[in-house]
Amino acid sequence: APQQLLAGKKVTITAGPTREALDPVRYLSNHSSGKMGFAIAAAAARAGAEVTLIAGPVRLATPAGVKRVDVVSTDDMLAAAEQAADDCDLFIAAAAVVDFRPAVVAAQKIKKEDGNDSDVLQLVKNPDIVATIAARSDKRPFVVGFAAETEKVTEHAESKLTRKNLDMIVANDVSDPEGGFNSDRNAVIVIDRSGQHPLPAALKTELAAELIALIAARAFAK
Ligand code: PMT
């Protein structure tokens, strides 16, 4: 059995995409499969944590011993995250949250015959879930974010670490065809205020165990 690095700890993890409806038949989303977040949830449970996994729409089985909360929209993921974070020691945001949603959700299917043109979509900014949790002064867990980047990966990740007031960020180069969205493998660089720690390419299941060991050491070192 692995070391019980998170025994007695309550951990919340967001995983997968969010989905924003345009009308009854269409939505905005992204290519996140949930594999990375689900692997982290499984690793945290094996490390002895009480895990709440807040999952966007994905086709994955719930890891053993994990409490799963299924959500669709960003607002629903935020509400579930706020509730779980009220009683949690560690919050890990692996979800690929949709940054903009349609300003209105059409009640009926949007028709091109109804005079709609290329300006048919008006978008508004979604709330930032991990930044909302990290901005708390009361009931604030140790907060770990991800940064999905396609260029200047560590530079952009460091600026997200600061801007969102995170304790740690996992920089993910999603332009690498071997890793990132939907792949079974991934490579990341973990960054906190003490420096950078690369975790080389591995199965997401293996990488998740290394991540949990690293996070546990930083968050709960005695
Ligand atoms: O799900 P997989 O197919 O396994 O793919 C894994 C992954 C590539 C999705 C994952 O490793 C990853 O990088 N997740 C973060 C994806 C992302 O959208 O990153 P970002 O750089 O846009 O966001 C930065 C951080 O803020 C993330 O922790 C994100 O969860 C969080 N965020 C972003 C926007 C928002 N409105 N609310 C948030 O909480």
Image (cartoon, rainbow, N blue to C red):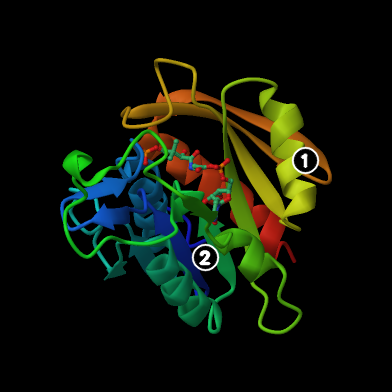
Of residues 1 and 20, which is closer to you in this image?
20
Q: Quadrant of residue 64?
A: bottom left
Q: Vertically, is 65 above or below 55?
A: below
Query: What residue does disc 2 label?
Result: 6
Of residues 17 and 124, which is closer to you in this image?
124
Residue 94 appears anywhere in the view: no
Q: Residue at 42% of width from left, 74% of height from top?
A: 80
**Residue 128 in picture, x, y percent from top left:** 58, 59
Query: What residue does disc 1 label?
Result: 159
The numbered mark, 2 or 1, whose residue comes first in the sequence reads: 2
**Residue 220 in picture, x, y percent from top left:** 68, 65
**Disc nearest the viewer among 2 and 1:** 1
> What is the quadrant of the C terminus in the image?
bottom right
Q: Quadrant of residue 101?
A: bottom left
Graded by Cα atoms within 10 Å as few (under 14), some (14 to 19) or many (20 or more), the crowding at tag 2 reads many
Numbered label attached to residue 83: none
Question: As drawn, is 123 to the left or to the right of 20?
Answer: right
Q: Quadrant of residue 131?
A: bottom right
Mark 2 to mark 1 CA distance (whole Å):
28 Å
Q: Residue furthest front?
A: 115
Badge 2 element: loop
Q: Vertically, is 39 above or below 10?
A: above
Residue 222 appears anywhere in the view: yes
Q: Amino acid at mark 2?
A: Leu
**Residue 192 in picture, x, y percent from top left:** 76, 45
Q: Residue at 71% of width from left, 76% of height from top?
A: 136
Q: Amino acid at mark 1?
A: Ser
Q: Vertically, is 171 above or below 47?
A: above
Q: Residue at 31% of width from left, 32% of height from top?
A: 182
Asked whether mark 1 lies closer than 8 Å to ligand 1, one says: no
Q: Vertically, is 94 above or below 14?
A: above
